[in-house]
Image (spheres, grey):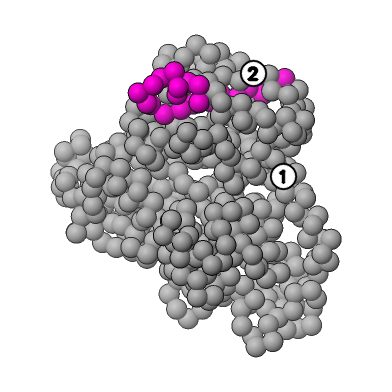
Amino acid sequence: MGFKASVGIVVARALRPAILGLFCLGLSGPSAWAAAADGSPVLRIHGSNTVGAKLAPKLIAGLFEAKGLQSVRIAPAGRENEQFITGIDDQGRPVRALVAAHGTGTGFAGLKDRTADLAAASRPIKPTEAQSLAALGDMRSAESEQVIAIDGLAVIVNPANPVQSLSVEQVARFFAGEIANWRELGGANVAVELHARDDQSGTYDTFKELVLGSQGKVLGSSAARYESNDALSQTVSTRPGAIGFVGLASVGQSKALAITDGDSQPMPPSTALVATEDYPLSRRLFLYADPKAQSPWTREFLSFVHSPAGQAIVDRSGYIAQAIAPIKLPVQASMPPPYQQLATEAERLTVNFRFAEGSAQLDNKAQRDVTRLIDYLESHGKKMNAAVLVGFGDARNDPARTALLSKLRAMAVRRELARGGVLVKEINGLGDQLPVASNSEAGRIKNRRVEVWVY
């Protein structure tokens, strides 16, 4: 079964309890979802352009259709980067939702002043933002923080540009204005043009953290700024010297470069590498809700997003759905012997579990992924002695401690799987071997991981 084809099976099993809970509440028909008496939106999503430009409107439209609303359509709301999603209920009344995609920061502001029901974010909530919303509750709790898809930040150039790959350091130097001509890296004698998202963008925040910040750089003053991913990509595709960055779904006619980080191999923003979050510029896409007070529409929408239908929309929109599928890795001489054996005899699954520094506690996404993994193994007859867990750590001064922590993390995943009736064949801790990122703070988070393999 291919990666995309597995979306429905995996997510259907993983979200079965939540979906059943909705039907127990009797919220399955359009009559339960009356239009607002004053005609105001029944659901308001503010925030990330990456989430809001395409994905959120399509997800709302999918929910409306699933609820039996008629004549569902998406249309501009009269202001740039804002859209209404409308439908007609079973009594002939219009129902509408609003998506305002002006940047991740505006979503948290909307939650705070209660002009938004959900904040769309293309990065995790910042400590300062969580503190400003503390009156609502714990914004990092499972009730608030929802990972809805995986995205990759693609570094894009004109299709005719001969350069195929760049390191994170080189990308940072480009955008800091330190590389002025493509011939410095083997390209044509063409001046470099910088194209970047604006300061309200979660895409820019992620780029600033993963690229510029990791190298101690700041964005060059000559960069053209954009509120929209698609507009940026369209411009880059027509300019010979252009370089920019966009969400994975917005590469369009531009060319995406392979990226290296530290000692990693060049990695293109492929489906599998983004799904495992190994690609250096991969990221999670989020929705944040009030953890205590959510309207029926908000609760239903969040459940729909995680459902088979919702994740299928994620997939069709060009992002990576939270599904699990096997991939075959080629054996490489640089792999340690136990890993070479796995690559020869087994397949790796497109799910990774990652941890905070010094921690073996699963985050919100990992908790959902445990359920998905259990159901994947069950549906493929691999619950008994077929799965292998391989833990990794980040480079530290104490290799023995790193190796121990990497194995402890694998043991933590094994413990959670055992609660679902899975008997793991083997666990292994490979310490700081096979890094997928540099030893920067963001890179260390990526390197601290548990991979899942199946025979």
Q: Is residue 93 above or below residue 17?
A: below
Q: Is residue 431 above or below residue 35?
A: above
Q: Which residue is mark 2?
A: 426
Residue 51 location, x and y as percent?
Answer: 51, 59
Residue 243 location, x and y as percent?
Answer: 28, 50
Residue at 48% over, 60% down: 130
Is residue 1 something one can see in this rendering? no
Q: Which quadrant of the rendered structure holds the C terminus? A: top right
| Circles 2 and 1: CB atoms closer than 8 Å | no
Residue sitting at the far top: 337
Q: Which quadrant of the rendered structure holds the N terminus? A: top right
Q: Is 400 a magenta residue?
A: yes
Which image quadrant for residue 267? top left
Q: Which residue is mark 1?
A: 14
Residue 48 location, x and y as percent?
Answer: 46, 62
Question: Badge 2: how crowded within 10 Å, few (<14), some, or many (20+)?
Answer: some
Residue 426 location, x and y as percent?
Answer: 64, 18
Residue sitting at the far front: 135
Q: Between residue 422 and residue 203, name the one nearer to us.
A: 422
Tag 1: residue type? Ala
Report the magenta residues as a range.
385-405
As measured in the structure, the alpha-carbon distance from the residue carrying label 2 to the one carrying label 1 is 24 Å
